[in-house]
Image (cartoon, rainbow, N blue to C red):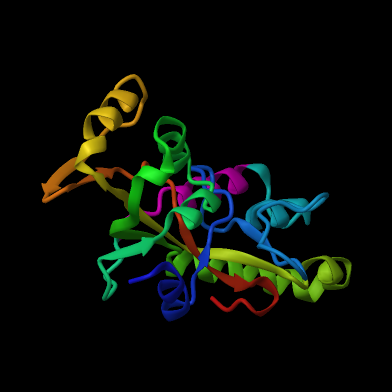
């Protein structure tokens, strides 16, 4: 399935700057124009940070809940599609660290196809959703006026999607490619030769490429 169709079918957003520090509960700011932002000057970057700032959490519980949400297991995505295809231009805009390393080692014009395969996901548990909903209800009752104007356009990540990065290049580039990445920290997970092409697979290394976001002010546990 093509990336745009994948996003539309499952109502997901691409992550504008992928890294392993993005976790469930991270806040996403929806600008009037442009891509969603993971940072907003003067505002917390995670829902539990917001609760801590509003004095709804003490330090020990803030640390406990953050650790719990970081430990949510990655499981099979169980989607109808097993892979998501995208072209080279999209690859350069994803800001995925693995794609960036490949780009530094190989001219992307030599890549005929990119895809995310072996799709997995990490989802916010019911317990976490209920807990967050409870804190939001307290916030709405006691301090909503203070935060309303600032959080009107803020969303929260409730699901993260991961996929092994696959690329296809011509067999004639095989030696050049393998030589170029031999001195890097890129590990080839799998290699398949077929006809005049070769497909390489790289592990996602816990770096998500897509997310499901829900508006904070309308969130329901």
Location of residue 102 with respect to 47 vertically, above or below? above
Residue sitting at the far top: 183
Residue 39, given in percent of the width and then of the height, sits at 71, 51
The residue positioned 66% from the left and 43% from the top of the image is: 59
Q: Please, what is the dominant secondary structure of the magenta stretch?
A: helix
Location of residue 91 with respect to 79 vertically, above or below? above
Location of residue 95 with respect to 162 vertically, above or below? above
User: Relative to 109, is 218 on the left or the right?
Assistant: right
Quadrant in which the N terminus appears:
bottom left
Q: Nearer the viewer, residue 145 or 99?
A: 99
Whether residue 65 appears in magenta in the rendering, the answer is yes
- Total residue callouts: 0
User: Relative to 119, is 217 on the left or the right?
Assistant: right
Residue 47 visible: yes
Whether residue 66 appears in magenta in the rendering, the answer is yes
The residue positioned 81% from the left and 50% from the top of the image is: 41
User: Relative to 169, is 160 on the left or the right?
Assistant: right
Residue 46, given in percent of the width and then of the height, sits at 64, 53
Residue 166, given in percent of the width and then of the height, sits at 29, 50
- Report the magenta residues as a range: 60-75
The residue positioned 83% from the left and 65% from the top of the image is: 150
User: Residue 36: which quarter of the image?
Assistant: bottom right
User: Residue 160: which quarter of the image?
Assistant: bottom left
Residue 206 visible: no
The residue positioned 28% from the left and 57% from the top of the image is: 117
Residue 23, given in percent of the width and then of the height, sits at 52, 51
């Amino acid at each position: 399935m093509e990336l745009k169709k994948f996003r539309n079918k499952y109502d997901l957003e691409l992550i504008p700057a992928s890294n392993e520090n993005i976790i469930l509960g991270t806040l996403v700011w929806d600008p009037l124009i442009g891509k969603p932002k993971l940072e907003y000057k003067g505002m917390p970057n995670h829902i539990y940070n917001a609760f801590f700032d509003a004095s709804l959490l003490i330090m020990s519980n803030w640390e406990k809940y953050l650790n719990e949400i970081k430990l949510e297991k990655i499981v099979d995505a169980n989607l109808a599609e097993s892979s998501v295809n995208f072209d080279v231009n999209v690859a350069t805009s994803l800001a995925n660290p693995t794609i960036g390393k490949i780009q530094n080692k190989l001219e992307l014009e030599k890549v005929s196809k990119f895809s995310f395969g072996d799709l997995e996901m990490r989802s916010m548990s019911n317990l976490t959703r209920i807990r967050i909903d409870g804190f939001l209800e307290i916030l709405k009752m006691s301090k909503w006026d203070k935060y309303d104007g600032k959080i009107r356009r803020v969303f929260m990540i409730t699901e993260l999607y991961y996929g092994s990065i696959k690329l296809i290049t011509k067999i004639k580039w095989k030696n050049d490619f393998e030589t170029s990445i031999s001195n890097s920290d890129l590990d080839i997970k799998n290699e398949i030769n077929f006809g005049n092409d070769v497909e390489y697979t790289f592990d996602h290394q816990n770096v998500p490429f897509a997310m499901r976001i829900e508006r904070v002010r309308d969130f329901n546990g």
